[in-house]
Image (cartoon, rainbow, N blue to C red):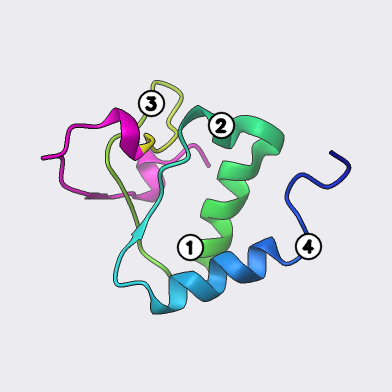
Amino acid sequence: AKAPIGDGNDEAVLLAATWAETTLCGWGVHGAHLDQGVKVAKMLRSAGHTLHHLGLTKAGHPRHPLYVSYDTQPFVWTQSSATD
């Protein structure tokens, strides 16, 4: 695709995060594509959002919820645990 991220995607993500009670990141290893995971995490943090995850992959990406036990509780995703 010429534009896999799409026009208005960042704005939609930021808007959704403003009304969300918890911002849960869970893109898994696919966040490495075009370095989009790091970009989205930086964008959300820059906008003042506290990010959460359900565990991190070996590469430091937030695990996709489909691959996490139902009883797993969210963790705050700190800068030190992030890949950025």
Query: Which residue range is magenta in the image?
Result: 65-84
- Residue drawn at x 45%, y 33% as measured from the top left: 28
> Which sits earlier in the primary sequence, circle 1 or circle 2?
2
Per the image, the residue denoted by label 3 is: 57
- Real-space CA distance between mark 1 and mark 3, rounded to the nearest whole angstrom: 20 Å
Closer to us: mark 2 or mark 3? 2
Identify which amino acid the numbered label 2 is placed on.
His
Identify the mark at residue 45; answer none if there is no mark: 1
Q: Main secondary structure of the magenta part?
A: loop
Instruction: Tell whether 19 sits left or right of 22.
Output: right
- Farthest residue to the left: give it: 71
Identify which amino acid the numbered label 3 is placed on.
Thr
Element type at mark 2:
helix
Q: Nearer the viewer, residue 7 or 32?
A: 7
Asked which quadrant contains residue 36, the reply is top right
- Real-space CA distance between mark 1 and mark 4, rounded to the nearest whole angstrom: 21 Å
Identify which amino acid the numbered label 1 is placed on.
Arg
Per the image, the residue denoted by label 2 is: 30
- Magenta segment includes 82: yes
- Magenta segment includes 69: yes
From the viewer's perspective, is residue 55 above or below residue 24? above
Closer to us: mark 1 or mark 2? 2
Crowding at mark 1 (Cα within 10 Å: few <14, some 14-19, many 20+):
some
Q: Position of residue 6 (x, y in %)?
A: 76, 55
Per the image, the residue denoted by label 4 is: 7
Instruction: Tell whether 81 sits left or right of 12.
Output: left
